[in-house]
Image: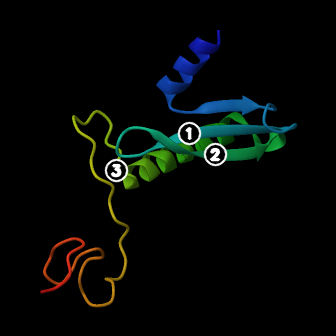
Amino acid sequence: MLRREIQAIRKRGYAESKGGIFTGGGALTAPLKDFSGKTVAVMDILTPEHRYTPQHRERCIALLLDGARRGSDRLGFRPGAGRPAPPRRPAGPEPAGGRPRGRSPAGRTGASPR
């Protein structure tokens, strides 16, 4: 029974609980996967039972799956890819000195300039 439930969760991409996480509410959760395909975190949505209508539930599922997909993408996950992609660096200002972090002016990681 439990094995079938786990397979169903994996197939649809999220788990759902009504009253199991907290009394009087619903919970949805989806995995965030890294570049190796390993689940490294989860994203969840909790909502009070009185708001957990079929329409609200469907909207929450869509938002959850989109958020989990985007988070996994940022971690380098590529579904169905032959090889894992390396993680992407978040966009941001260039470090002081105008060169990538971890590189010496000579362009060698860990090497000192000569």
Name the side, left or right, on which 38 lies relative to 86: right
Provide the secondary structure element on which disc 2 rests: strand
Q: Nearer the viewer, residue 111 or 90?
A: 111
Q: Earlier in the sequence, mark 3 or mark 1?
A: 1
Q: Which residue is mark 2?
A: 44
CA separation in Å, label 3 and label 2: 20 Å
Provide the secondary structure element on which disc 1 rests: strand
Q: Which residue is mark 1?
A: 30
CA separation in Å, label 2 and label 1: 6 Å
The residue sitting at 86% across, 38% down in the picture is 24
Under mark 1, the amino acid is Ala
Q: Earlier in the sequence, mark 2 or mark 1?
A: 1
Provide the secondary structure element on which disc 3 rests: loop
Under mark 2, the amino acid is Asp
Please state the horizontal and vertical placement of residue 6, each as a whole percent of the image.
57, 20
Could you classify mark 3 by the number of other residues whose Cα lies within 10 Å: few (under 14), some (14-19), or many (20 or more)? many
Q: Are marks 3 and 2 in contact (CB under 8 Å)?
A: no
Q: Which residue is mark 3?
A: 76
Total number of numbered discs in the rendering = 3
- What numbered label is drawn on residue 77? none
Q: Are marks 2 and 1 in contact (CB under 8 Å)?
A: yes
Which colour style is shown?
rainbow
Under mark 3, the amino acid is Gly
